[in-house]
Structure formats: structure tokens, C-alpha cells
Image (cartoon, helix red, strand yellow):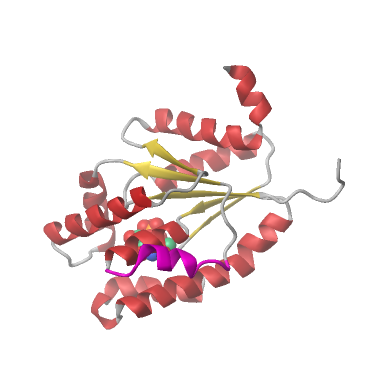
Amino acid sequence: MSNQQARGKLIVFEGTDGTGKTTQRNLLGQYLQNQGYPVIITKEPTEGPYGMKIRDLYRHRNRYSREEELELFLADRRHHVTEILHPGLLDGKIILCDRYYFSTAAYQGALGLDPEAILALNDFAPEPDLVLLFQASLDIGLQRITAGRGETLNNFEQREFLEKVAAIFSTIKRPYIFNVDASGPIEDVHRLVVRYVMDLLQPAYTAAQD
Ligand code: TYD
């Protein structure tokens, strides 16, 4: 066995707005901490300088072109990778990240940019070990966006946009992406999430439970 420090793990929560990603990320964080894992909880857009510009973008959507919007998310990610993700992985941490470059492919892709080209622009960012793609009805998500952000798009536009986002998410295939049915009660979804994550962290242990 090598005595080099093992690389940590990058676990990403993806999906359309309002599918409960953040709640599940936090519950998983608590669960893993209780088990003694060194956990970092993080998200994109970040709270850093570009993340703050992105929040400004939600308030004044028309001031940015889709190319500028893409650039902002990429700049925010570069900062995130340098400041949090690379150091955390080198330090053997289990990083739980709310949204990552699949969101850029899906959301900026839904604005008309090519999702595969967007993914290719992210080759500076470490590939995740596991992506949980949360899937639930768009109705719940729409209510939460309108209430939470006060965006000015009408319901039809929002629904149409999020349907495109969801469609692009489902076209991205990678061996480490798993769909999570997020329509059930929080505890049921949590159990599913724990199952996927423990398969990654302790495959021998979960196999023995079958
Ligand atoms: P969200 O996770 O809802 O953040 P918060 O809860 O802090 O507001 O993300 C905000 C929005 O950003 C969401 O609608 C998806 C969008 N987004 C992109 O369009 N591209 C990206 O690359 C990322 C990371 C997010």
C-alpha cells in the first residue's frame, strides 16, 4: 500500500432548481461528519467575487449576453477550483458541491450555446467521482424560484427554459452520473443518496449489506 495521501472525493449535486439538492447535500454532510469523514460543503455559484457578479446577473438579466454569462460562470469556477476544490482534494477531503459544470452545460446550453462545447471549456476543473442528478416535478421548482429570486420571467417562459435545462441534463452521459428520484419524502431521498455515496466511499461495506 502506498503511504501517499489519498486524493479526496468530489461529489456533485445537480438538477433543476427546487429539486432539493441543497437540503440533501446538507443532510449528507451531517451524516458523513457523524461517521468521521472530513467533509467540505461548497457550492456554485460561489460567494466569491464572480459569484457576487452572477447574483447581480439574476437581478439585471438583460445587461449580459449569454457569452458574458458563460464567462462569468467559468471565471467563478476557476476561482472555486483554485481556492477550494484542488486544495481540498489534495488534502483528502470529501467535497460535497452543490452544482458544477453540468449546470453550465444545461443552463447556458438552454440559452442556445452548445452543451458539449461548454463541457470542453471546463477541462481545467477536476472531474467528479460521483454526480447525483436530482429529478422532480418542475412545478415545485418554479414556485421556489419565483418566491426566492423575484425573477421577472413569466411562468410559461420559466417552464419552457427549465424544460430545456432538464432535457440537456438528461443527455449528458458519464459513468459516474446517477439519477436520483427526488420526488419522495426527504428521508427516502436521503437513504438513496447515502447508498450511492457509501458505494463510492466503502464499496466492500455496502456490498456486504445486500
Ligand atoms: P442555485 O444553486 O439555485 O444557487 P442559489 O441557491 O445560491 O441561488 O444556482 C443559481 C442559479 O444559477 C440556478 O438557476 C442555476 C444557475 N447556474 C447556471 O446557470 N450556470 C452554472 O454554471 C451554475 C453553477 C448555476
> In this rendering, does residue 2 appear at all?
yes
Quarter of the figure with residue 88 = bottom right
Q: Where does the N terminus fall, quadrant-wise? A: top right
Quarter of the figure with residue 200 = top right
Q: Is residue 118 magenta?
A: yes
- As displayed, is residue 139 above or below residue 116? above
Q: Position of residue 125 (x, y in %)?
A: 57, 64
Quarter of the figure with residue 36 = top right
Residue under the image location 23 percent in, 46 percent down: 138
Q: Position of residue 179 (x, y in %)?
A: 40, 39
Q: Position of residue 59 (x, y in %)?
A: 28, 73
Which portion, as a residue range, is magenta?
A: 112-124
Q: Position of residue 96 (x, y in %)?
A: 55, 49
Q: Is residue 89 magenta?
A: no
> In this rendering, does residue 47 appear at all?
no
Residue located farthest toward the bottom when viewing the structure as drawn: 63
Residue under the image location 64 percent in, 19 percent down: 208
Count of numbered circles on the image: 0
Viewer-side residue, 160 vs 27: 160
Viewer-side residue, 155 vs 30: 155
Residue under the image location 63 percent in, 68 percent down: 83
Which quadrant of the render holds ligand 1?
bottom left
Q: Where does the C terminus fall, quadrant-wise? A: top right
Q: Is residue 38 left or right of residue 134?
A: right
Q: Is residue 33 left or right of residue 173?
A: right
- As displayed, is residue 105 above or below residue 192? below
